[in-house]
Amino acid sequence: MNKFNKYFLMNEKDILEYAKEKFKYFNSKDTTCNEIGDGNLNYVYRVKNNKKSVIIKQAGVHTRSNSSGRILDINRNKREAEILTYYGKKFPKLAPKIFYIDETMKLFIMEDLKDCIILRDALIKGKILYHLPEQITDFIIETTLSTADFFTDAFSKKNEVIKYTNKELCKISEELVFTEPFFNLLKENVFSKRLKKYVEKEFYKNKKLQFEAAKLKYEFMNNPQALIHGDLHTGSIFTNDKYIKVMDCEFAFYGPIGYDLGTLIANLIFSYVYHLNITNNKKFMRFIYNAINDIIKLFKKKFLIKFKKDIKDISAKNEEFKKYYLDNVLKYSFGICGLEIIRRTTGCARVKEIESVSDEKKRADIEYSLLKIGKEVIIQREKLIKVADFTNWLKFNL
């Protein structure tokens, strides 16, 4: 019986054997396999020899730490590979190529982006990437709006909503993004000790903020506007000097269009606050400052162009409706931006911009600045859709 006819969780030795059995070009003696992923959801390996290099991503039944006992949909990698394939058809340069999907072993094999680095790491190093705003807004606009009601057949869209229902990973988002920052029910929240009283007062006991978070949560749960990435941040984007590649879409489902824009802006703010407090690299800070503004402005511009050019539903061609729809998307984006900042500052899924800071006082100062921004963005999101320069507002509130 073939070893790979029934699912089991593989290690490096198994992956190497698997690759050699499935693909002739890996039968050479110089073929090696190394685990390269450090995420909490999947097992990621690089298999290579002097002719070929690929990435193999396999799903496990549990989260890797499993401290919360979460059980995950074992078929999620098939959905992720299908969505990456969809991204590749829309933008061949902005997504990795998918070579093979194995439904039995719950894995897929994709292009090795060895000429790219993770965007978060590039930004921490102060790398200026002028192509980022244009390419990431192209990606968000086209991959979301192309699947929204106004741009596709409504009957087919409802079938797609069912197909890409993502219960287990949506539940993780519902807990970690919308609930835990304000209630700490799982007792997994982590932040500087000197901020304990501040967090308790401004988040655990702040009924007004909890009310706003609840509104955002239930829109996330009940508004299947379009197919969204669901976890778009600087750790799920690879880059080089010419282009980006969007990865890690296992959280994708039909949800609010503004979600991806919000998480992206939040993670660029992490970079800005890190350099403001640690490096004081003014040239890079100006780049991030302008990139955030450009992304928001380009999103608005491309959104309206797409609406005018490709809209199919006559009801949505009304000028007032277009403004109403865009304003609501942006308002939700700012709400999500605030939640993403808070949850990655106080929660268990923290970011390098905080974790890499060894000086306790500086780290606490960074956390305080971020929590203050996150709270204000949520509370003031209605006003922010009218702000011409978001980063001027941001600087005023730092």
Image: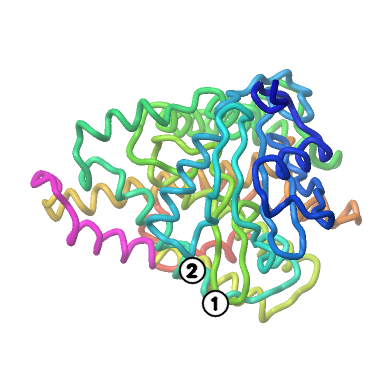
Q: Residue at x 53, y 50 (%)?
A: 98
Q: Residue at x 55, y 30 (%)?
A: 103
What is the quadrant of residue 234 in the picture?
A: bottom right
Q: Nearer the viewer, residue 392 or 169?
A: 169
Q: Is residue 37 above or below residue 25?
A: above
Q: Is residue 276 above or below residue 32?
A: below
Q: Is residue 89 left or right of residue 284?
A: left
Q: Which amino acid type is marked by label 1?
A: Tyr
Q: Is residue 192 above or below residue 135?
A: above
- SS type, badge 2: helix
- SS type, badge 1: loop
The label shown at residue 119 is none
Is residue 97 highlighted in magenta? no
Q: Where residue 305 appears, x then y in whole percent?
A: 24, 64
Instruction: State if disc 2 and disc 1 touch (CB < 8 Å).
Output: yes
Q: Where residue 257 appears, x then y in whole percent?
A: 38, 45
Magenta portion: prevailing SS class: helix
Q: Which residue in the rendered view is the most extreme toward the bottom?
A: 283
Q: Which amino acid type is marked by label 2?
A: Pro
Q: Where are the magenta residues, as a range?
A: 298-316
Q: Where residue 308 appears, x then y in whole percent?
A: 17, 60
Q: Which residue is mark 2?
A: 133
Type of colouring: rainbow
Q: Which residue is mark 1?
A: 130
Q: Nearer the viewer, residue 395 or 135?
A: 135
Q: Residue at x 85, y 56 (%)?
A: 357
Is residue 315 highlighted in magenta? yes
Q: Nearer the viewer, residue 30 or 189?
A: 30
- Residue 259 visible in the current orientation: yes
Say which quadrant the N terminus sits in. Answer: top right
Q: Is residue 379 above or below residue 243?
A: above
